[in-house]
Image (tube, rainbow, N blue to C red):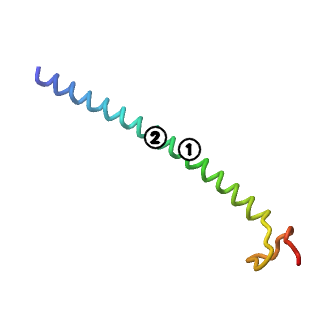
Amino acid sequence: MINSSKGQATVEYILIFALMAMIGLGMVRGIGTALSSSIKRLSFVLTQELSTGVCPKRCFYNGYKNRISN
């Protein structure tokens, strides 16, 4: 009887560990998806701002096509 209860406890610990591992993987996937979409949105906004910005004076880049001329 002692051996069967030890085996049962081991199986229970394995099941608890598997459940915790699945929950952890789900959380990591969710965070990864959210982080990826945030980075994509940020890169899109930065690309739009840097490619269509207007620089009236003291530009670090004078090659803007829509630059305001004085």
Give the image location of residue 28, x and y in percent.
47, 43
Q: Relative to residue 59, is residue 30 depicted above or below? A: above
Which residue carries the number 1 mark? Answer: 33
Q: Assign the C terminus to one quadrant of the image.
A: bottom right
Give the residue displayed 50% in from the left and 42% down from the top.
29
Query: Reading the chain from its start, which is encountered first: label 2 or label 1?
Result: 2
List the single residue furthest toward the front: 70
The image quadrant that residue 9 belongs to is top left
- Left or right of 50 in this view: 11: left
Q: Is residue 36 left or right of residue 18?
A: right
Tell whether 45 sits left or right of 30: right
Q: Residues within 10 Å of mark 2 (few under 14, many from 20)?
A: few
Q: Which residue is mark 2?
A: 27
Which residue extends farthest top? 1
Q: Which sits in the foreground, 2 or 34? A: 34
Q: Amino acid at mark 2?
A: Met
Q: Is residue 44 above or below residue 28?
A: below
Residue 14: percent from the left, percent from the top? 29, 32
